[in-house]
């Protein structure tokens, strides 16, 4: 056992029953964790417990099943708040996923024509489409600032360049950034985020009566490393529970000031304190109920709290474990990167790419069909070994298609706490012959 990783990783694997389902007389090798992780047994038990023992509505149900739901939901909200170091559980809003969390903020803020949203150039579509749609509806516009002013695949976030661009952009109301890229795993350093939030909340801007907020898409961060929303001083942060051993269909939107948003995405149901038929506007409850309309995904919320409890004592060691695994993949792919058969996206140091190792396989000539390459050379061989990963542009369409090029086969390996060095070596054993045939 690695002294820097004091956890028993082999024992942890047994917390995930799906890993012990064989196919082709082989176990699954799941390296698609940036999309969705495997639920742990504790979460599965919590879902079954709800369905078997108190399958009712919370909030307005006064019977004992309803009271039990209320107690467990409150406990889950506290667990999530503690997990990201939020000051108060009322700052935790349960949503379907990170996408809905980002849209909740986008649709809830007050916008005026000409307001500006600033994003990075390698954002997930969830942190792009909302602003483009709002631009057509309200007249706001989106400004894209590259990591360091270039399209270099290995570039890192240059906070001085970013702040310089912000200072020269009038009417910025929101900075919305992926804290960790789902494309290449690069994480913006905490100190850089603190400098951005310090600028956004500075006295100079307040004296000018400028509303300036910072939101983070932390879908690829919260499950993998400790995040302290108070230390970062962000106004909003969204993440998905299905990326942290929890159930699907459940995410979180953190709001530093839950009263800031003018409206919710959906109204009615559990958001309402009172309504009228004489023309008066409905009266809505305060956060978090203000934003959680209708019957909630009760079992998912309970599972979210259990997932946070399961992970909380593993986060420090998890970063080291993922680095150990990513280093195996990076070192194995490096000879092909150096010979320009592939490009490893992001900084070449795996310590700066967390749990993700993405490679681009270059076409050998202008006629090669890279879709056919993926189907016939890659997927046919990897499927036999139960090796699961992701291909495509990973919802980072403009950068992948228009900057990097459409005729490239992108393959993303993403790691989590139940993955092993042997699984990474197996992935390399499968891919080496495929890549070796492409050597000049």
Image (cartoon, rainbow, N blue to C red):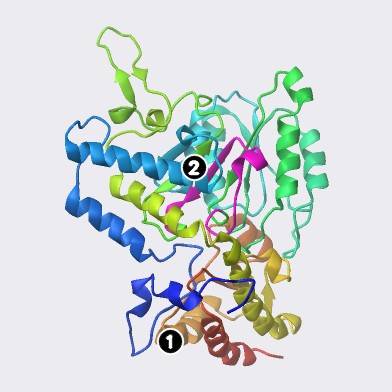
Q: Is disc 1 surrounded by few (<14), some (14 to 19) or many (20+) residues within 10 Å? A: some
User: Regarding mark 2 in the picture, which secondary structure is present there?
Assistant: helix
Mark 2 — residue? 81
Which quadrant is the C terminus positioned in? Answer: bottom right
Question: Is residue 229 covered in magenta?
Answer: yes
Q: Position of residue 210 (x, y in %)?
A: 70, 22
In the image, residue 335 lies at what x, y percent? 72, 85
Give residue 397's position: percent from left, percent from top: 57, 57
Location of residue 369 by image quarter: bottom right
Q: Nearer the viewer, residue 140 or 87?
A: 87
Q: Residue at x 44, y 62 (%)?
A: 36
Q: Is residue 257 above or below residue 437?
A: above
Identify the residue at image location x=50%, y=86%. Answer: 377
User: Vertically, is 419 above or below 93?
Assistant: below
As drawn, is 149 to the left or to the right of 133?
A: right
Question: Can residue 376 be seen in the rendering of this structure?
Answer: yes
Q: Nearer the viewer, mark 1 or mark 2?
A: 2
Numbered disc total: 2
Q: Which mark is residue 418?
A: none
Q: CA distance from mark 1 to mark 2?
A: 40 Å
| Residue denoted by label 1 | 385
Q: In the rendered view, does 70 fall on the left or right side of 38? A: left
Regarding mark 1 in the picture, which secondary structure is present there? loop
- Decide: is 260 above or below 250: above
Q: Which residues are magenta?
A: 222-242
Q: Residue at x 36, y 56 (%)?
A: 247
Q: Answer with the quarter of the image where residue 319 lies.
A: bottom right
Q: Residues within 10 Å of mark 2 (few under 14, many from 20)?
A: many
Q: Locate residue 435, reporting x and y percent.
A: 61, 87
Q: Depth check: give the residue in front, 67 or 142.
A: 67
> Nearest the camera: 364 or 74?
74
């Amino acid at each position: 056992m690695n002294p820097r990783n004091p956890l028993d990783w082999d024992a942890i694997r047994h917390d995930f029953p799906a890993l012990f389902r064989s196919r082709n007389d082989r176990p699954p090798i799941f390296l698609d964790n940036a999309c969705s992780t495997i639920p742990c047994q504790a979460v599965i038990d919590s879902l079954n417990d709800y369905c078997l023992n108190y399958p009712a509505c919370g909030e307005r149900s006064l019977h004992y099943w309803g009271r039990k739901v209320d107690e467990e939901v409150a406990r889950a909200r506290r667990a999530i708040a503690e997990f990201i170091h939020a000051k108060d559980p009322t700052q935790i809003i349960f949503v379907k996923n990170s996408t809905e969390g980002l849209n909740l903020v986008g649709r809830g803020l007050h916008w005026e024509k000409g307001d500006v949203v600033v994003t990075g150039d390698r954002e997930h579509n969830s942190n792009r489409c909302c602003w483009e749609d709002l631009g057509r509806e309200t007249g706001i516009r989106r400004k894209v600032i590259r990591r360091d002013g270039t399209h270099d695949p290995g570039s890192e976030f240059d906070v001085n360049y970013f702040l310089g661009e912000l200072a020269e952009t009038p009417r910025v109301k929101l900075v919305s950034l992926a804290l960790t890229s789902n494309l290449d795993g690069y994480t913006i350093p905490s100190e850089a985020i603190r400098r951005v939030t310090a600028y956004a909340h500075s006295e100079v801007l307040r004296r000018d009566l400028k509303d300036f907020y910072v939101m983070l898409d932390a879908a690829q961060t919260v499950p993998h490393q400790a995040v302290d929303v108070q230390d970062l001083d962000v106004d909003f942060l969204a993440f998905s529970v299905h990326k942290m051993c929890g159930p699907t269909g459940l995410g979180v939107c953190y709001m530093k000031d839950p009263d800031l948003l003018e409206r919710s995405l959906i109204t009615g149901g559990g958001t309402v304190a009172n309504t009228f038929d004489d023309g008066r506007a409905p009266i809505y409850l305060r956060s978090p109920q203000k934003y959680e309309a209708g019957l909630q995904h009760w079992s998912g919320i309970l599972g979210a709290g259990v997932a946070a409890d399961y992970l909380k004592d593993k986060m420090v060691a998890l970063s080291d474990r993922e680095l150990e695994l990513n280093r195996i993949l990076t070192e194995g792919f490096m000879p092909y990167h150096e010979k320009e058969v592939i490009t490893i996206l992001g900084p070449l140091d795996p310590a700066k790419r967390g749990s993700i190792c993405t490679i681009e396989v270059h076409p050998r000539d202008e006629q090669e069909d890279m879709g056919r390459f993926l189907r016939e050379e890659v997927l046919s061989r990897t499927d036999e070994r139960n090796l699961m990963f992701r291909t495509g542009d990973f919802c980072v369409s403009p950068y992948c298609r228009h900057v990097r090029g459409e005729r490239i086969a992108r393959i993303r390996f993403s790691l989590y706490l139940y993955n092993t060095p042997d699984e990474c070596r197996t992935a390399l054993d499968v891919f080496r012959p495929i890549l070796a045939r492409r050597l000049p």
